[in-house]
Image: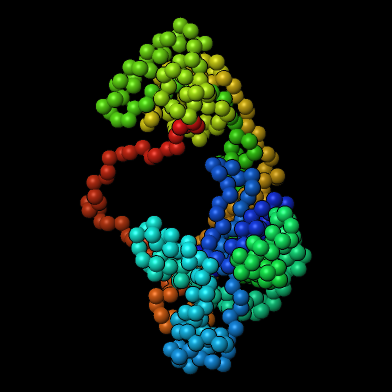
Amino acid sequence: MILVGIYLDPAALACKDCHWTVDLVLRMSTLRCLPPKRKGTSVRKPLYILSMLLLLGACRTGAKSSATGGAKFKAPAGDSTAIIAGFDTLGVTKGQIDKLLQPMIVEIAQQAKASNVSFDQAATQMRRQAAAQVLMQAIFEREVKANKIVVDERKVDSIYKAVTAQFKDSAQLLTALAQAGDTPASVREKIAKQLLHNQLLETVLADSLKVSPARIDSFYQANMDRFGGAAKVRGRHILKLSKGPEDSAKAHGAILAIAKKLSSDDKQFGAIAKAESDDPGSKANGGDLGWFNPKEMVPEFAHAVETLEPGKISAPVRTQYGWHIIQIQDRKAGSTPPLDSVKPTIEAMLKQEVAGRVVPAYYRKLAKTYKVEFLDASYKDEIFEEPKPAMAPPPAGMLPEPAPARAPAQPAPAGK
C-alpha cells in the first residue's frame, strides 16, 4: 500500500545532496514509490521518505451531482462519471481515478502481461491507492487549515531549485515536466502542499515521532560499520563448482589437488586460477576479486577471509557454490565517523521507522473522523480498514513439526 502523505524529515530539506527531489517531483503524477537509492549497507546518502504520495490537485466540488452518486456527495464540476467514494459533500469519481491512471496505462499493461492477469486485475490496487490519495489529500487540506499551518516559501524555493539544477537547461526540464503532465507552477504548488502535509504530521504526531538519544546511540553502536567506509580486503580465489551432492566429492578432490600444488609454490596461484577455476567472473584475472567487504560474502567465505593474514593461502573452504581456495593480498581499515556527524541521519532513519507505525493509524483516525464512505467497495484501500489482529498461537501440542533447518540464500562472492 502507498501511504497517503509522506513523512519527510526536516533534515532532508537542508540536505545538500538532494538528488532524490527529481524523482519526488517527476513522480508526483504517478502511483509509484520512490525507489531506494542505497545499495548494500551504505547509508551515506540518507533517505527520509517513508512512502511516496500522489500530490493531487485539490478536489473541487461543483453543483452537479453524479448520476449514480445520489445527492449526498457532489462530483467535481463537469464530471458526470459515477461517484465511488466521498465524505461530507465531496465526491470522488471514477473519472478522476481513470485520469490519474492514464499516464500509467502502458506500465499496467506490461504488469498484466508479465503476471498473466487481465488489465483490470493489474489496475485494481492502483485504483484503490489513487482513490485513497484523492480522499486523504482533501482531508489533509482541511486539517492544514484547522491547524493554521503555513508553508515556508524558502523551503519551496530550495527544493524547486534542487530539481531544476538536475536538468541541462530549461527546455529539458519543461519536456520532462510535460511528460508527467506538469508545469513549473504546478510543481511548486505540489511541493508546497507536500511541505504543508509534512508540517501537519510533525505537529500532530510530534510526541509519537520523538527518538530518544539513547535509541540513537544504541543504533550507532550496533551499526557502526554501516557508516563511513567499511573495512575492505583485496583478494583472489580459485573455485571448483559443486552443483549438488553428487559432484561435491569430485570438486573437493580437485581443490585438494590444487592446494597441494600451491603448498609447494604459491606464486602459481594466478596461473592455476586462469587454468582451473570455475568462476567465470574472476578466472580470466587470475581469480582476482578486487576490493570487497567480507560481510558481503557468504558466511563461510567471509569467515575464512576475516581470519586470513595477507599473503597467506587458506585451506579449502566449502560454500553453497562449491570449494574455494582464497588468498588475501591486502587490507584497508574501515573508518567510522563520530556520532555527532551522523546523528541527524540516524534520527531521521529511526523516525521513519516509528512513522511506519504511527502514521497509518493517524490516517485511519482521520478517515473515521471525516466519515469517509465508499459507494463502490472495489475502490476501497486497506488504509480505510482496521488492521487485522495478529493470530493467536495454536494451543500447545498442536504446532506442526518444524521443517528441516536450511541455510538462507546468500549473495555470491564478488565475481560470481
State the residue at coordinates (46%, 6%).
264
Report x, y in % for residue 65.
51, 91
Query: How far across and down, in percent of the image, does residue 219 sit?
Result: 58, 46
Q: Which residue lies furthest to the top in this view?
A: 264
Residue at the spot 69% in from the left edge and 77% down from the top edge: 148
* Left or right relative to 366: residue 249: left
Q: Nearer the viewer, residue 174 or 80?
A: 174
Up the image or down, 190 lies above or below 350; here it is below
Q: Which residue lies furthest to the right in this view?
A: 154
Pick the front one: 241 or 50: 241
- Is 336 placed above or below 263 here? below
Q: Which residue is drawn at 51% across and 34% down?
A: 295
Q: Which residue is drawn at 72% across and 54% down?
A: 168
On the image, which quarter does residue 29 sit in? bottom right
Residue 394, compared with residue 64, is above or below; it is above
- Kindly tell me whether residue 227 is visible in this rendering: yes
* Residue 156 position by quadrant: bottom right
Image coords of residue 1 (percent x, y): 47, 64
Colouring style: rainbow
Task: Decide if residue 261 is on the left or right side of residue 17.
Answer: left
In this rendering, the answer to whether 343 lies above or below 8 is above
Q: In this view, does 402 lie to the left or right of 407?
A: left
Residue 13 x/y as whole percent: 70, 58
Quadrant of the drawing holding the C terminus: top left
Question: Is residue 188 visible to the viewer in this orientation of the structure?
Answer: no
Q: Which of 175 and 350 is in front in this view?
A: 175
